[in-house]
Structures are given as structure tokens and as C-alpha cells.
Image (spheres, rainbow, N blue to C red):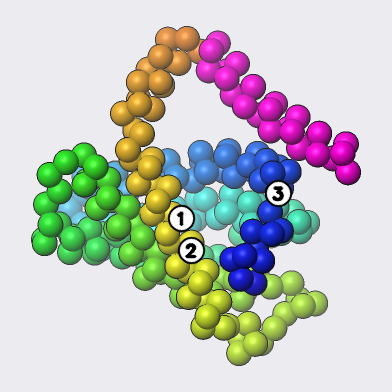
Amino acid sequence: MTISQALKEMNFKLISNFFLTTFPTNMLKFPVFEIINMAMTFTAFSPGMSGTISGFLFCTAMLPVTNYRFRKSMGWEIKPALLYQAYVPTVVRDILYGWARGFVAVAVASVWKPQTFTQEAFVFAFVIWAACIISSPCNEWRGYTLQPKDKKLSFGEYFKPINYARSTGIGATIMGISLFVGRLVTPFAETAFAYLKGHPAVGVAALAILVGGFKLIAGGDDDKE
């Protein structure tokens, strides 16, 4: 569908319900990749090889989380046996993403040295955006593999260049912008976490209010319907 069609199908109820899935899964997935990626910097591997290893380890560890969120978003049944579904295209995608991230980071560093914190955040976001673009063909492969058997299309019917370009461009841009903003707010987040570390009750209360608020709003929409 087009972007305008997709936006028309969105409402706050859907967003708030899915937030309760994306928030905890992202809090697992993103830190794990960054930890693995950082650990690779202490090895003697080249950036490309480090990225390749990072992608393999990340996919193998986090694929159940990825597939859980995917099936939840599609409203499909969630079974433990299906949590490693589409392992091959996903691990190839994550390996290619990890390699591309290392390769692009070195290429960018050779032509531009960021001078400010904002520029560093932008370079980081650009590297992520480019890595998403480079690894995107495997997303099509993964999506094709995950089709329900009773509605499965041939690859010729499934793959549409305009759809691929649109979904890849939007997905990579969302990832780049989100991590750009994330990098910018890191100093503030560190200050907040330092405070919450000394006041854990405040952190628990804030999380409870956040989750409860989303559930209340979603439930309120249900009552109106």
C-alpha cells in the first residue's frame, strides 16, 4: 500500500498496543547488538569481519525476539517452534548489515572527520542508514519466506520494485533518524539513569505509569467501540 493508505489505517489504539510489544523487544535487541559490536572492537578482526561475526551472533541470539514481534504485529499465532522461522535469510541479512556497517564506517571516516557531537551523531546515523540499504535485499527474502502457506505468492508476484524501494527507503530512514536522535539524547539519558540508579523506586513508578497509561488509553478506545 502507499504511505497515505498506511497512515489512514493507523490510530492511537493500534500504536499504544504495539508499543507495549516494541518497547521491551527493542530494549533487548538494540543493546545486545551494540554490546556485541563494541566487544568486536577489542579483537584483531577487520571492521568487515567484526561486523560479520556481530551479525551472526546477534541473529542467532535475538531471532526469537524478532519473530515474536513480527508475528505479534501481524496478529498471527505465536508458537515456540516458529520463533526460529526464516533463520537463513535473517542471519544472512544481519551478517550483511554488520559487514556493511563496518565497511561504511571506515569509508566515511576516511573522507570526513566530524568535529562536533552533533556531526558524530549524524555520521553514526548515516552509517546505519547505508547499512540498512545494503542489507535490504535480504529483507525481501525474509518476507517472502515468512508468507503464510495458504496465501503464498510466487517470487515474481511477491517482489515489486516500487514496493521494495518504498519500504526500504522508509525503513532505513526511520532507523537512521531514531538512532540519530538516540545518540543526541544519550548524555541526558545517562544523567537520568544515574538518578534512577540512586532512586530505583522512582524508576519503577515511572515505568508503571508509562505502561499503565498506554493500557488505559487502549482500553478506553475499546470501551468507546
Q: Position of residue 191 (x, y in %)?
A: 35, 20
The mark that comes first in sequence, 2 or 3, is: 3
Q: Residue at x 12, y 44 (%)?
A: 115
Q: Which residue is mark 3?
A: 11
For the magenta stretch, what is the residue range?
A: 201-225
Classify mark 1: residues with Cα within 10 Å, few (<14), some (14-19) or many (20+). Answer: few
Q: In the image, is residue 68 above or below residue 190?
A: below
Find out whether residue 197 is within the magenta segment.
no
Classify mark 2: residues with Cα within 10 Å, few (<14), some (14-19) or many (20+). Answer: few
Q: Quadrant of residue 205?
A: top right
Q: Which residue is mark 1?
A: 174
| Residue 77 in view of the camera | yes
Find out whether residue 212 is within the magenta segment.
yes
The kind of residue on which mark 3 rests is: Asn
Q: Residue at x 21, y 39 (%)?
A: 117
Q: Mark 1–mark 2 contact, CB under 8 Å?
A: yes
